[in-house]
Image (cartoon, grey):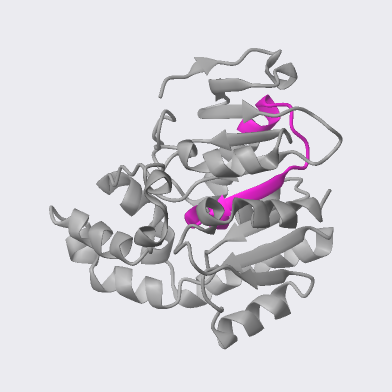
């Protein structure tokens, strides 16, 4: 992909592929039709190209798909903590001329979408298959941390990718899952999980959901399998207005296999 810098007129452009908004590379699609704009945030090692089926399903609704810092055509950063990346995203959203968007985040993009909504104006968050508490995933990462920090780090990523259910998708959709598993990105985006206690992580996510509750921000958590009861109890206690749904059959990528269903969720938020 290549990008060009968007000038002051960028918010008036209905279709602009490969523009630079703030620090980030982006594709702007659709036009302002009175509904809340949609911000699309991909998962770790992927890029904005994975959102093509969702963009098609949005059928002209204003949307922007970003390459996260260090991904695709967006430059790297010294740190990738959720709060810092959320602020970078907000600068890019402002450069696009969007106000109080609906944030759609896949995998770690959902953690970033939640952090964004706790810090900046947002209409709602659609969390695609990302538990906000690291739980067993944190245990796994810590158990393989020496490998993750060494020359064998790709083995860790391969193990995780093999569990994503990519084979459940049709071959053309698999082609959208371009992946660049650079070691600096894995360590940078997973630093919070690796270096923060489970108790502190729980407090941070609980505080973020508390802000969303206070502001009346919508939240829907879609997963490929039923959420564990202890997690679901915590989640519904922290944000009672949140809703959940299960979309099996597309592995970790329901936005690729069932984009129209997810767009129906967005319709409820205007």
What residue is rendered at 56% in x and 73% in y? 202
Find the magenta span and give its range.
Answer: 92-111
Place residue 46 in its image quadrant.
top left
x and y percentages locating residue 117 in the rendered image: 69, 52
Task: Based on the picture, tell me whether residue 239 belongs to the magenta stretch.
Answer: no
Q: Does the image show residue 250?
A: yes
x and y percentages locating residue 74 in the rendered image: 44, 30
Q: Nearer the viewer, residue 129 or 131?
A: 129
- In the displayed structure image, the side of residue 262 where residue 151 appears, left or right: left
Task: Based on the picture, tell me whether residue 110 belongs to the magenta stretch.
Answer: yes
Q: Nearer the viewer, residue 94 or 27?
A: 27
139 relative to 204, above or below: below
- In this view, the residue farthest toward the left is 151
What residue is rendered at 38% in x and 64% in y? 165
- In this view, the residue farthest toward the right is 34
Q: Nearer the viewer, residue 157 or 260?
A: 260
The number of numbered badges drawn on the structure is 0
x and y percentages locating residue 68 in the rendered image: 48, 39
What residue is rendered at 23% in x and 69% in y? 144
Q: Does the image show residue 118?
A: no
What residue is rendered at 40% in x and 62% in y? 168
175 relative to 114, above or below: above
40 relative to 230, above or below: above
x and y percentages locating residue 155 in the rendered image: 19, 59
Quarter of the picture containing the N terminus is top left
């Amino acid at each position: 992909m290549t990008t060009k810098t968007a000038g002051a007129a960028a918010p008036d452009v209905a279709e602009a592929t490969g523009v630079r908004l703030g620090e980030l590379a982006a594709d702007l699609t659709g036009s302002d039709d009175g509904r809340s704009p949609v911000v699309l945030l991909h998962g770790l090692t992927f890029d904005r190209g994975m959102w093509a089926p969702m963009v098609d399903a949005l059928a002209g609704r204003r949307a922007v798909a970003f390459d996260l810092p260090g991904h695709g055509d967006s430059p790297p950063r010294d740190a990738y903590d959720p709060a810092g990346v959320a602020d970078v995203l907000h600068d890019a959203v402002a450069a696009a001329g969007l106000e109080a968007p609906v944030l759609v985040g896949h995998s770690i993009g959902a953690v970033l979408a939640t952090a964004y909504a706790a810090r900046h104006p947002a209409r709602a968050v659609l969390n695609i298959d990302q538990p906000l508490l690291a739980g067993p995933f944190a245990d796994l990462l810590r158990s393989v941390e020496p490998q993750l920090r060494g020359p064998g780090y790709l083995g860790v990523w391969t193990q995780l990718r093999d569990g994503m259910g990519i084979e459940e998708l049709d071959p053309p959709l698999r082609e959208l899952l371009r992946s660049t598993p650079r070691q600096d990105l894995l360590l940078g985006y997973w630093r919070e999980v690796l270096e923060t206690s489970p108790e502190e992580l729980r407090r941070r996510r609980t505080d973020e959901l508390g802000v969303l509750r206070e502001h009346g921000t919508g939240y829907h958590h879609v997963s490929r399998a039923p959420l564990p009861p202890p997690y679901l109890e915590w989640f519904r206690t922290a944000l009672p207005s949140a809703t959940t749904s299960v979309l099996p059959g597309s592995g970790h990528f329901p936005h690729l296999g069932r984009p129209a269903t997810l767009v129906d969720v967005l319709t409820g938020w205007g």
